[in-house]
Image (spheres, helix red, strand yellow):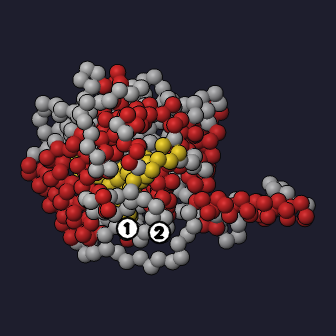
Amino acid sequence: MTAATKQRVSYFYQPDVGHFYFGPSHPMKPHRIKMAHHLILSYGLYRQMECYRSHPASPDEMSAFHSEDYINFLAKVTPDNLRGYGNQMQRFNVGEFTDCPVFDGLYEFTQLYAGASLDGAVKLNRGDCDVAVNWSGGLHHAKKSEASGFCYVNDIVLAILELLKVHARVLYIDIDVHHGDGVEEAFYCTDRVMTFSLHKYGDFFPGTGHIKDTGAREGTGFSVNAPLTSGMTDDAYARIFQPVMAKIMEVFRPGAIVLQCGADSLTGDRLGCFNLSLKGHAECVRYTKSFNVPTLVLGGGGYTIRNVARCWAYETSVLLDADLPDEIPYNDYFEYYAPDFRLHLTPEQRENMNTEASLESVRVDLLTQLSALGGAPSVQMAEVPPDFEVIKEDAEAEKERRGTKETREGEGMNDGGAGDDRRSSRSRTKDGRGEKREHESELAG
């Protein structure tokens, strides 16, 4: 690619995002995000992209997908008051007996990683960059009203909803070792979002992602699942990823792509069971980038944190078409990379349990599924809705206008008047009482 056509990359980072702590025995370590950031700095990659400090997502922004009572719960619960939230913790799958603990700053953490993904989506929608990167995002297990698999707020769904304001079709790709169940579930009944997940399947969290789970109603055929087993190598992974991805681009023709780069599919991961090198993992990034479609690149899983940092720094270089030396430059976390202080990983000497026949069966089944779609669905696009920054400005103007009106009329906020219903029109019943229940598929409408 020549300098004239070099893709513009925007990088989103919040300095505080790496300071949160899930607990002493918990495998999720936000510190890995800071380690990756310091590698990006020490390799000098920041000079080749526009770097932004992202905004923290607001409750309204997060409620574009999540239920308001769930977001309100996350905003209020703390380690000091959780005894008063026993029923809600059970309802929302949060707390001591789940994999989603209540820790100091939980809500702020969700705001930071979700805000960065939204900022990236808005930047892409405005045409201000070709690739947007948020390594703190990619938390793909969270549901509309439920935490799951270390994920509380699904920043991916929020970003896709933002992208759908401009793009008729969005492709979601998930190369985490775990199935991207939260994203698939959110868009299972729509043909405007195609989800493509390659993952370990069978006696493995979250237990979803069978090859026959292809979508429902208008979304039938638009959920693409590649169920794999332990020991996946670089070559085996590419033999599934590249032909299926090529067929998706031919048939679906997305206007934007969201790529979740969970690093737990790397060799030696604390929770994963694949055997990919950095180069094999990053080849998916390189291949996706080659289609020159606006792309939001996110993090995800990854529990051997020195390897997560290596992976995301290297994949940043791939997005920038930059070559990195294998010697890791000195940085604040240099000792983590002992004893070799090298960037690249050597796959383990272990058997790939995926046979040639099983891989060929998956590849053929997925290509057959995609061929049956017959072409990209057409969407009648209306006037583009404003992005959240414009909405925020309008809300502030409305608040100021209402404040003037209240002073004039003597009617205040929260006094039970008709103007106090803060729900969107989508969430109100005709008489204003109660709340209309929405199926996840309506979110993409």
Q: Amino acid at mark 2?
A: Val
Q: Secondary structure at mark 2?
A: loop
Q: Position of residue 132 (x, y in %)?
A: 42, 53
Q: How many marks?
A: 2
Q: Position of residue 318 (x, y in %)?
A: 28, 48
The answer to which of 75 and 38 lies nearer the viewer is 38
The answer to which quarter of the image holds residue 337 is top left
Q: Report crowding for label 1: few under 14, some 14 to 19, many 20 or more residues within 10 A (C-alpha).
A: some
Q: Residue furthest front?
A: 3
Q: Are marks 2 and 1 in contact (CB under 8 Å)?
A: yes
Taking the spot 21% from the left edge, 70% from the top edge, the residue there is: 371
Taking the spot 67% from the left edge, 71% from the top edge, the residue there is: 430
Q: Which mark is residue 255?
A: 1
Q: Report crowding for label 2: few under 14, some 14 to 19, many 20 or more residues within 10 A (C-alpha).
A: many
Q: Sequence-wise, which precedes: disc 2 or disc 1?
A: 2
Q: Amino acid at mark 1?
A: Gly
The answer to which quarter of the image holds residue 422 is bottom right
Q: Position of residue 233 (x, y in %)?
A: 16, 42
Q: Which residue is mark 2?
A: 166
Taking the spot 26% from the left edge, 33% from the top edge, the residue there is: 343
The answer to which of 25 and 87 lies nearer the viewer is 25
Taking the spot 51% from the left edge, 41% from the top edge, the residue there is: 14
Image check: 377 left or right of 50?
A: left
Inter-mark Cα distance, 2 to 1: 9 Å
Q: Which mark is residue 16?
A: none
Image check: 138 left or right of 56?
A: left
Q: Position of residue 169 (x, y in %)?
A: 38, 68
Image check: 423 left or right of 214?
A: right
The answer to which of 88 and 222 lies nearer the viewer is 222
